[in-house]
Each structure stands twice: as structure tokens, then as C-alpha cells.
Image (cartoon, grey):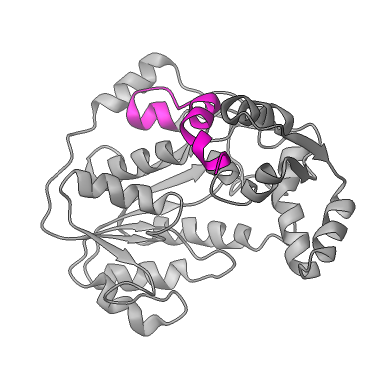
Amino acid sequence: MTKHLTEQSTTSTTKHRATHSAPHPTKHPILVTGGTGKSGRRVVSRLRALGTPVRIAARSAEPPFDWRDRTTWDAALDGVRTVYLVPLDGELLTRPFVERAARLGVERVVLLSGRGVDVPGYSGEANSAGATHVDGESAVRDSGLAWTILRPAWFAQNFSEGFFRDAILAGELRLPAGDGAASFVDAEDIAEVAVAALTEDGHTGQTYELSGPRALTMADAVAEISRASGRAIRYVPLSHREFVTELIGLGWSAAEAEEYAEAVGPIRRGLDAGLSDGVPRALGRPARDFSEYADASAKAWRD
């Protein structure tokens, strides 16, 4: 999903940041859904470094949590006043979960949403995550809880921990992104903003559009990774249909292949190149550049 391309002046950013407080100590655990994912595990690590009690919501946790099994929700929420909420893509479970959380005493929720929630036509019909984010944002705004919404751009970590890593290791990234650019955001920045919103005053009612400080084409991103890792990597642009056909040939279902292609489509259409002010507005510093991410992640492409 994408976002409004808002920019604030340095004066405005400084003023907003000055209203925030130091993290509040709490005896209540902060519940982190998606606590083993790209942003969630970084949120958990940062909260623990602050000495904040944390409860990870996962099927392997104790108590176990399963998005699709509502009988597990109450135990995960027991004694919780604050939640970092990473929704289950493709499902409309955020609203009933938030409603249940409010009834059980939760007071604050920080929702990980996505770009394009407020941009008509951003997500294709095959992209099920779009409906999840639209309904999720509406749910937290309607909840009566203190809320903060994060709308990140494409995670830079998709190249080192996610969708694109195998292709990078193989030396060729093949995508239907054309020569479009994306303002990739470092998951470390997402986590730092999330922790600020979970533990400080001054973030309630804020929707933070999160991006890096510049937009890169896929060819640009691959060049940065090649520089940092010492690997020879090239980007090969494909048409939507070529990409879907290749994935089906690799054993993907047609529906999954279409959804992946449509997720990349906004880059090709120029909808992901905009720069957002959420990181400086929330943290009072610039967002990390992609080159910093590539240097810090080089080991992931050398193994």
C-alpha cells in the first residue's frame, strides 16, 4: 500500500518531536504480534533493551497465540495495556482483535499498516493485504484507544531477509518493476518509531508515513548491494505476465503469482517513489539511507 507524499519543514518536525517524552516504565507487558518478523523482532529487542516487559504473540509462545484461533487471544492479552499490532495479511481479523483488546483493558495500540491505504487504485484486485490494512486502520481509529498508525514503504530488508534474498544470492533479480523507483525504508527505523509510539507520549493520533531519504530503482538497489557485498548482481525487468508465468513454472499457484506481481506493480507505476517525513517527525533525525542498510547487511549476501 502507499501514502500521501507529505513533507514538513525542519521547524515543524522539531516542534512535533519536542512534545515527546522519555519512555515510560511499565509493569504491564507490551504485547508484540508478529514478534518474530522483520519489524516485530526488532521491536522486541529494543523494548527489552529498555527494560520493558514484553510478551510475544506467536503459536510457539507461552501462552500460544494464533490469529485464526480466537480462543487464544484472551491469554495473550491478559494484563496487557499496550499492543504492537502486525496484522495477518489477507484476513479481516484486526477489528475483532482490537475490539477484544479494548474490552480486556488495552489502552494503546500501534498498528503496522502499509502504503496506499488512502490511494485509490494502489492495490490490484489480487492483493489481499490491501483490504486488511484499510479495515485495520478504520478499526483502530474507531476503537476509542490511544492509537498510532505506521505506513512503511517497501522494507529494505526484503533484499536480505525476505522476498528478494534468494534472487540476490543467485545473482539475478527478476521483477515486474520496470524502471520505477521505491523509497525503501530500513526496518530498524520502523522498529524505532514503533517503540517510541509504544513507550512515549506525543504520538497518539499520529499516522506516520515511513520511507527512506531517497528513492532507488531496482537497478540502483542491486548496484548498492553489489558494492556492499562484492557480489555480481543484475536486475532483469519483466512484464507482469512474464513474471506470473515464471512463478507458475516454479510451482506457485496462479493466485499467489498474481498477488506477488500486483504487490510489485505500484513500483512500476511510479507510486512508491515518494519520500515521507514520518521518521524525522517521530524521531527527530533523518531516515537511514539504503547504502547504510546495504553496508550493515553485507554479511547476509556473503554466506
Question: Mostly what secondary structure, the magenta segment?
Answer: helix
Q: Residue at x 75, y 33 (%)?
A: 180
Q: Residue at x 36, y 47 (%)?
A: 42
Percent position of residue 224, x then y: 62, 26
As rendered, which of 63 and 16 lies closer to the eye? 63
In the rendered structure, the answer to whether residue 7 lies left or right of residue 2 reads: left
In the rendered structure, the answer to whether residue 153 lies left or right of residue 110 reads: right
Determine if the magenta segment contains residue 115. Answer: no
Percent position of residue 34, x then y: 41, 61
Q: On screen, 119 above or below 41?
A: above
In the rendered structure, the answer to whether residue 82 lies left or right of residue 215 reads: left
Percent position of residue 106, x then y: 24, 63
The span shown in magenta is: 279-303
Q: Residue at x 36, y 70 (%)?
A: 99
Percent position of residue 115, x then y: 58, 45
In the rendered structure, the answer to whether residue 42 lies left or right of residue 132 reads: left
Q: On screen, 250 above or below 201?
A: below
